[in-house]
Amino acid sequence: MPQIGWFEILIIVVVAILVIGPKDFPKVLNKVGSWIGSTKRYFSDIQKKMTKLEDEVTPDDPEVKYSKNNDEGVEKKNDR
């Protein structure tokens, strides 16, 4: 993954100010920040849903090969 230093960031900011203009630059930064925030929330929500789904599907005990709501799995484990 490429690394960006402070000098490269400074060049990007200067070029952005020249292209966008100093008057609209704060508005653009606000909009980009809003997009980044909503994207982070979206992926965080997906990650939480996947973790919840994984917890529902994967039993706590690896010996139990059935779902948590299935009584057969509990009976088979207790038959030993």
Image (cartoon, rainbow, N blue to C red):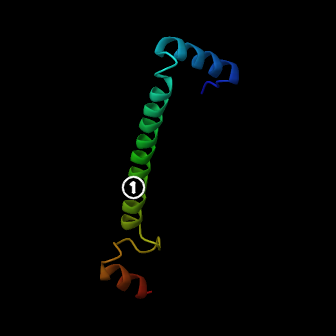
Task: Locate residue 17, reporting x and y percent.
Answer: 54, 16
Residue 1 vertical placement versus 19 (above, below): below
Badge 1 amino acid = Met
Task: Locate residue 78, reporting x and y percent.
Answer: 42, 87
Q: How many marks?
A: 1
Task: Locate residue 50, reporting x and y percent.
Answer: 39, 55
- The answer to which of 42 and 65 lies nearer the viewer is 42
Instruction: Kindly identify the residue that appears in the image at 34 percent across and 72 percent down.
Output: 66
The image quarter in which residue 13 lies: top right
The image quarter in which residue 64 lies: bottom left
- The answer to which of 23 and 57 lies nearer the viewer is 23
Farthest residue to the bottom: give it.
Answer: 79
Q: Residues within 10 Å of mark 1 (few under 14, many from 20)?
A: few
Instruction: Kindly identify the residue that appears in the image at 64 percent across and 24 percent down.
Output: 4
Instruction: Kindly identify the residue that appears in the image at 36 percent across and 65 percent down.
Output: 57
Identify the image quadrant of the N terminus: top right
Task: Locate residue 59, reporting x and y percent.
Answer: 42, 70
The image quarter in which residue 35 lies: top left
Tell me the residue that label 1 is attached to: 50
Give left or right: position of 76 versus 19: left
Identify the image quadrant of the C terminus: bottom left
